[in-house]
Image (tube, helix red, strand yellow):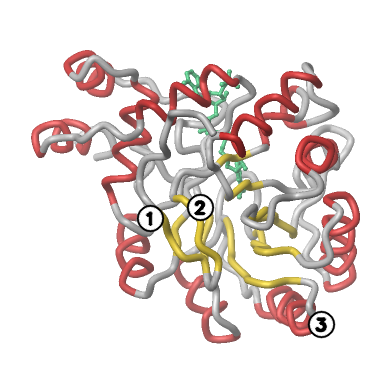
Amino acid sequence: MSSLSLPGGTWKLGDLTVPRFGYGAMQLAGPWVMGPPADHAGALAVLREAVELGITHIDTADAYGPRFTNEIIREALHPYPESLHIATKVGAVRDEQGGWPPARRPDQLRRAVEENLQVLGLETLDLVNLRLGNAEGPQPESLAEAFETLVDLQRQGLIRHLGVSNATPEQVAEAQSIAPIVSVQNMYNLAHRHDDELIDRLAAENIAYVPFFPLGGFSPLQSDALENVAARLQSTPMAVALAWLLQRSPNILLIPGTSSVAHLRENIAGAGITLSGKDVAELDQIGR
Ligand SMILES: NC(=O)c1ccc[n+]([C@@H]2O[C@H](COP(=O)([O-])OP(=O)(O)OC[C@H]3O[C@@H](n4cnc5c(N)ncnc54)[C@H](OP(=O)(O)O)[C@@H]3O)[C@@H](O)[C@H]2O)c1
């Protein structure tokens, strides 16, 4: 085990304890999340380093690649350590143009769960998020039929815990009226704070909020305020953005993506920095 320690402590996803600092595997697929990794050996190295550094929460989806990200996770880490929990998503597939069309009919969801199980080499998926909406963001529509399908698969023992992704607060509540969820995975970062109220509500209910694009995703966060705070703290903008999320609420779990061992180590080393009230006040202006 390396001398780096994971910042943020731990969280319980249902009965599964995970460090709040996890890893998002989407960036391991090819450009625009299509095709195999540009650097196969590098992708294996990042995953193995993540686990070596103590990360036990890895976020993925069969749609990444498609299949390639799940294949590389299996190649890098199978047989998995007992402590490792892989969260996946179903509800969208890929088209030939690289789009993400919804696939939330019961037969599509069953197939997606089976494919995740098969490619990852698992008998049960620890956490499955139902991905809602589309590439533009959450859309107001009922999730009942799709979510009930996943509940059925959970009863059959194929899924341990359920969550929702790209969801409106109303859809989160609708899911909760059908079955317990352990996480909500939505877009959120210093510059996109639409879910502030939802995060606080989920925190009160002990449900994890897992921001996707914590560093801005395909358009990395850029802001003078972020640069200034990072310079003052002799840190990096990315580390400060992650530290801000860790300090924002105890139910926030990080899954920053990277295809670089150096960035992975840099993010872990930097995200433990303590932000003062003044730092947070300056950073809070970015999303307002
Ligand atoms: N539920 C959903 O609909 C949904 C949608 C999107 C993503 N996700 C999940 O969320 C995870 C995180 O999102 P994301 O990976 O797209 O975006 P992200 O974590 O916001 O940003 C990743 C980008 O930041 C760069 N980066 C990371 N550390 C850096 C550093 N120290 N210095 C400079 N650049 C750095 C990476 O480039 P390098 O590779 O060069 O480090 C990569 O381009 C994904 O992996 C995926 O699991 C879910």
Q: Amino acid at mark 2?
A: Asn
Q: Position of residue 259 (x, y in %)?
A: 64, 23
Q: Residue at x 77, y 24 (%)?
A: 30
Residue density around tag 3, few if under 14, some if 14–19, many if 20 or more, within 10 Å: few
Front residue of 152/171: it is 152
Q: Position of residue 8 (x, y in %)?
A: 35, 46
Q: Residue at x 37, y 63 (%)?
A: 198
Q: Residue at x 77, y 17 (%)?
A: 39
Q: Residue tagged by mark 3?
A: 156
Q: Amino acid at mark 1?
A: Asp
Residue density around tag 2, few if under 14, some if 14–19, many if 20 or more, within 10 Å: many
Q: Position of residue 206 (x, y in %)?
A: 39, 71
Front residue of 123/131: it is 123
Residue 261, image quadrant: top right
Front residue of 103/217: it is 217
Q: Residue tagged by mark 2?
A: 186
Q: Is mark 2 within 8 Å of ligand 1?
A: yes
Residue density around tag 1, few if under 14, some if 14–19, many if 20 or more, within 10 Å: some
Q: Residue tagged by mark 1?
A: 195
Q: Is residue 247 left or right of residue 140?
A: left
Q: Position of residue 226 (x, y in %)?
A: 27, 23
